[in-house]
Image: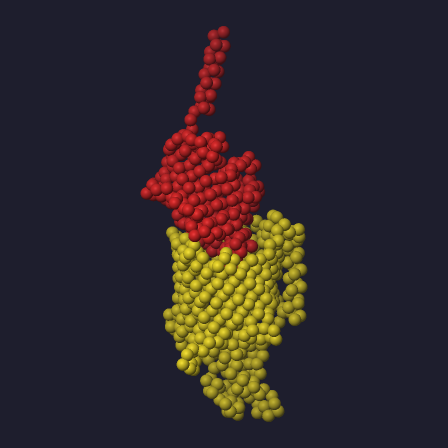
Chain colours: A yellow, B red
């Protein structure tokens, strides 16, 4: 609470000071949307004669946006907040309701200099959906990747500075206080199998397993910084970036203290800590058009990231606490994770014919270097993504398909949809997300979570 | 005495020559050039409301703000969509480049980023309307061959009727156009647009022309496809300002994305 309060107070002051030229706001605009999303999960396990239906999500979102700027547009303030209600228990609180400030910042803007402060969402990189250089914002992973990436991003309290000259700019972002990813709850259908195993250990032997989240302290050593140089050369947009900061995705370390005497007195033997580590990344991206085609590429090299080891399966099969204790004794001194460099790159193209047809293809590859089989993650992953959109009925009807296929491990994701505009401000969408592949793959892990969905949205 | 007579004759001759030049007929190209340059100013801002009525009677309204600036390298334009709510905040930045393909960037508020997009085909419809992308830009008379067809009265104004055919080096959406140019103001009153087979395709009618800050300005344009019974597109301009100081930073990706 104190941490949050400090964030808000500090950045509210900074935003107000920086946006002082806009103190007399010439233009204040309000907008937003109301939407409802319902997901019906097609349970595939132990089906009786027919399918089982499970409403896994019934999310209503009310979003408010406010924009203010002065006449010269040298000062600007922006606020985006939403209220969400979901009775299916995603938010895990008494009223199944959540409100959040997605973004709230103020800024000063001139020809050569921009300064912003507040809670902000950044978007770096030219690739689609998978952006190896877009590292500043953590994500809300409670619905896995079934929400689009812009919707998953969580705003960070930050200071953003841009120096510009002609077609080139240099940007620096400082994030003094760390914000982690939001992970799925323990009983969530979206919990990855790797996390599920860790929680199984705790639940099997609660009497001697301690599970604790350790957040980085608020100090300069745990701040994140990112810098980017970008511009246009000829007809090519390019970016080059560097990031030095905290990984919002946690890793888990374990300390084993298999002391029989302590155990008898009610002590713990296994201490699992959810921790966050610092790493560095450098990369770049580009984008240009030729004829009716748009081409893009993006890549980054990550230095010394933590990767989890595969757990001893015997630990997961034990039901007798004493037997579990014996296994832990043997595991004393072993590490549950190790540092490795890795890289990730994406390349693709898109083509459109007016507003009636749009095609988009991309390949994303990630590789862990100096790989050893003890790691829980695969050494290589290569995913082909495809997006097809077409419009009919004077653009009121949109039919589309988004798909992803992992050419290394043969898992896949298919997302067909139909969207109709009842009025310019009110639309409805009907679609599905279908997962396939082996249980220990990215998409295959969610094989039992196929669902149909509807979204109705009104914008104002 | 002799010198005075010679000087007087020379002066009269010069006067006659100059007067003749003033009253000489303009060529078709000159008329087309004057019409194209009529509202060419250093900067322009306007709020545009486009109403599209389909043949089925469905009506859609779009409102957007335009900032435009002439630079030595070409025209720079920023379009920010205001309505409907679904499009609010979407921005399109265009940098025309002389002798090269235009560069365009599209900003979608939901993505919080802009991306370079392929410059639209000239024959592509603008927002599903009866206007093509070519209609939304400024036509360069140097890309066409012009012929004066006749002089006639239209909408109560004496007009030149000019037929313009694109040169082989220019890839126009149209086979030819006919424009009715006001002889007094050189405002374009009406345009007939023909396809490459020579068949009438669309007719544009500027129904409201007035002088703003000394510049003859179209306040309303109506585009109707040949044979349409109900369908049409109208474009209304409001809040028009010329030659104001628009900072160069308005035509940058940073400004495009700061909405």
In the shown orientation, is residue A314 left or right of residue B194? right
**Residue A242 visible at all:** no
Q: Is residue B129 above or below residue A37?
A: above
Residue sitting at 48 percent across and 45 percent down? B234
Q: Return the residue nearer the eye: A152 or B11.
A: A152
Residue B41 is situated, as x and y percent measured from the top left of the image, at 52, 38
Residue B25 is situated, as x and y percent measured from the top left of the image, at 42, 26
Residue A158 is situated, as x and y percent measured from the top left of the image, at 60, 62
Residue sitting at 59 percent across and 71 percent down? A97
Q: Return the residue nearer the eye: A103 or A340.
A: A103
Among all residues in the image, which is located at the extreme top? B1
Q: Name the image quarter holding the N terminus of chain A.
A: bottom right
Residue sitting at 59 percent across and 92 percent down? A264
Among all residues in the image, which is located at the extreme left? B197
Residue sitting at 45 percent across and 24 percent down? B23
Q: Is residue B51 above or below residue A320?
A: above
Q: Return the residue nearer the eye: A416 or B13.
A: A416
In the shown orientation, is residue A293 left or right of residue A457? left
Q: How many marks?
A: 0
Q: Name the image quarter holding the C terminus of chain A.
A: bottom right
Q: Is residue A169 above or below residue A317?
A: above
Residue B45 is situated, as x and y percent measured from the top left of the image, at 54, 44
**Residue A77 visible at all:** yes
């Amino acid at each position: 609470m104190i941490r949050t309060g400090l964030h808000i107070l500090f950045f509210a002051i900074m935003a107000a000071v920086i946006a002082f030229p806009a103190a007399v706001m010439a233009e204040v605009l309000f907008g937003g949307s109301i939407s409802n999303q319902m997901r019906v999960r097609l349970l595939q396990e132990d089906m009786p004669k027919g399918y089982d239906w499970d409403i896994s999500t019934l999310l209503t979102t009310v979003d408010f946006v406010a924009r203010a700027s002065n006449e010269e547009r040298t000062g600007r303030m922006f606020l985006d907040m939403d209220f969400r209600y979901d009775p299916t228990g995603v938010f895990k609180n008494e009223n199944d309701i959540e409100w959040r400030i997605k973004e709230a910042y103020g800024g000063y803007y001139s020809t050569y200099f921009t300064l912003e402060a507040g809670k902000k969402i950044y978007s770096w990189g030219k690739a689609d959906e998978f952006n190896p250089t877009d590292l500043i914002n953590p994500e809300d992973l409670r619905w896995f990747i079934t929400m689009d990436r812009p919707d998953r991003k969580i705003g960070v309290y930050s200071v953003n500075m841009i120096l510009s000259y002609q077609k080139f700019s240099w940007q620096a972002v400082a994030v003094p206080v760390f914000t982690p990813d939001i992970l799925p709850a323990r009983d969530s259908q979206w919990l990855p199998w790797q996390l599920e195993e860790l929680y199984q250990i705790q639940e099997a032997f609660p009497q001697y397993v301690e599970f604790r989240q350790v957040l980085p302290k608020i100090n300069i050593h745990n701040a994140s910084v990112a810098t980017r140089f970008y511009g246009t050369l000829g007809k090519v947009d390019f970016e080059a970036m560097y990031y030095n900061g905290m990984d919002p995705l946690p890793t888990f370390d374990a300390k084993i203290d298999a002391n029989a005497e302590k155990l008898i007195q009610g002590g713990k033997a296994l201490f699992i800590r959810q921790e966050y580590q610092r790493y560095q990344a450098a990369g770049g991206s580009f984008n240009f058009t030729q004829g009716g085609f748009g081409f893009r590429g993006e890549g980054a090299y990550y230095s010394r990231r933590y990767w989890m080891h595969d757990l001893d399966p015997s630990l997961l099969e034990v039901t007798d606490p004493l037997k579990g204790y014996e296994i832990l004794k043997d595991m004393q001194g072993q590490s549950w994770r190790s540092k490795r460099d890795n890289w990730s790159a994406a390349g693709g193209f898109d083509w459109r014919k007016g507003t009636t047809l749009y095609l988009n293809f991309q390949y994303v590859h990630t590789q862990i270097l100096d790989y050893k089989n003890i790691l829980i993650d695969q050494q290589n992953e290569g995913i082909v993504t495809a997006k097809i959109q077409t419009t009919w009925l004077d653009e009121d009807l949109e039919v589309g398909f988004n798909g992803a296929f992992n050419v290394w491990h043969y898992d896949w994701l298919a997302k067909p949809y139909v969207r109709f505009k009842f009025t310019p401000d009110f639309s409805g969408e009907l679609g599905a997300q279908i997962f396939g592949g082996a249980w220990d793959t990215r998409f295959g892990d969610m094989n039992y979570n196929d669902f149909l969905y509807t979204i109705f949205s009104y914008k104002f | 005495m002799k010198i005075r007579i010679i000087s007087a004759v020379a002066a009269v001759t010069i006067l006659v020559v100059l007067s003749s030049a003033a009253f000489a007929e303009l060529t078709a190209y000159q008329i087309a050039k004057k019409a194209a340059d009529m509202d060419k100013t250093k900067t322009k801002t306007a709020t545009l409301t486009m109403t599209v009525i389909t043949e089925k009677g469905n009506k859609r309204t779009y409102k957007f703000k335009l900032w435009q600036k002439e630079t030595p390298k070409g025209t720079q334009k920023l379009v920010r969509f205001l309505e409907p709510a679904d499009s609010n905040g979407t921005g399109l930045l265009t940098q025309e480049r002389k002798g090269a393909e235009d560069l365009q960037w599209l900003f979608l508020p939901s993505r919080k980023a802009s991306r370079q997009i392929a410059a639209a085909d000239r024959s592509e419809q603008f927002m599903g309307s009866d206007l093509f992308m070519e209609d939304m830009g400024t036509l360069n008379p140097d890309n066409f061959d012009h012929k004066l067809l006749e002089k006639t009265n239209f909408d109560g104004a004496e007009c030149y009727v000019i037929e313009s055919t694109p040169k082989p080096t220019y890839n126009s959406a149209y086979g030819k156009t006919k424009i009715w140019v006001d002889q007094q103001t050189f405002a374009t009153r009406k345009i007939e647009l023909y396809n490459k087979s020579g068949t009438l395709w669309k007719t544009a009618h500027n129904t409201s022309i007035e002088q703003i800050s000394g510049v003859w300005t179209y306040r309303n344009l109506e585009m109707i496809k040949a044979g349409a019974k109900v369908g049409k597109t109208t474009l209304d301009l409001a809040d028009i300002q010329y030659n104001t100081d628009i900072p160069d930073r308005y035509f940058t990706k940073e400004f495009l994305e700061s909405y």
